[in-house]
Amino acid sequence: MVRTMKLTLALGMVGLSAMLLACSSSDSESPAATGTTAAATPAAAASPVEATLTDFAIALSKDSAPAGLVTFAAKNDGATPHELVVIKSDLAPDALPVADGKVDEAAMDFIGEIEEFPVGESQTGAFELDAGKYILICNVAGHYQLGMHAAFTVE
Ligand SMILES: [Cu+2]
């Protein structure tokens, strides 16, 4: 009885060793390709761009950032719910196509958004941005035409 258990244990350990060997050998077959990610680290550590939303304007704490992960900290200082939509465009901030009171996001290079949020609250959104020209808007119906847009450049 005891002998059988020892044998089982020994076989079990051999099996475990074989599995460990198999694991470590397969690991060495997939070299970590991380050579190009180092440049993203400084951008990720950059302080957020503060976007103050009011009725009806968007004020940014800075109007540019280095390419990479850009964080927007939006605060609703207005009297109605607002949102912050990130669009990549070379157009003037007030020249986007509008249909039914809203900018036609489907026709634009839509990057992402902080969805509509209540008065007095803050929301943060981080977006991976390539170099280029961007426009930040609030696309609650009517708000864009009333002036809720701001130009933003990624270098
Ligand atoms: Cu708005």
Image (cartoon, rainbow, N blue to C red):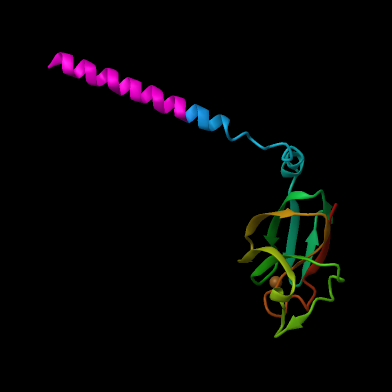
Residue 97's place in the image compared with 35, above or below, is: below
Q: Nearer the viewer, residue 23 or 106?
A: 23
Q: Nearer the viewer, residue 90 or 136?
A: 90
Residue, x 68% and y 37% (percent of image)?
Answer: 34
Which quarter of the image is occupied by the N terminus? top left
Q: Does the magenta stretch include residue 20?
A: yes
Q: Chief secondary structure of the magenta span?
A: helix
Which quadrant holds residue 50? Answer: bottom right
- Residue 11 placement, left or right of 132: left
Residue 10: percent from left, percent from top: 28, 17
Residue 153's place in the image compared with 4, above or below, is: below
Q: Nearer the viewer, residue 144 or 97?
A: 97
Q: Is residue 88 magenta?
A: no
- Residue 7 placement, left or right of 41: left
Residue 108: percent from left, percent from top: 75, 72
Which quadrant holds residue 45? Answer: top right
Which quadrant holds residue 8? Answer: top left
Q: Which of 75 and 135 is in front in this view?
A: 135
Number of numbered labels in the structure image: 0
Residue 31's place in the image compared with 5, above or below, is: below
Ligand 1 sits in quadrant: bottom right
Residue, x 74% and y 42% (percent of image)?
Answer: 40
Residue, x 70% and y 74% (percent of image)?
Answer: 105
Write down the region rendered in magenta: 1-22
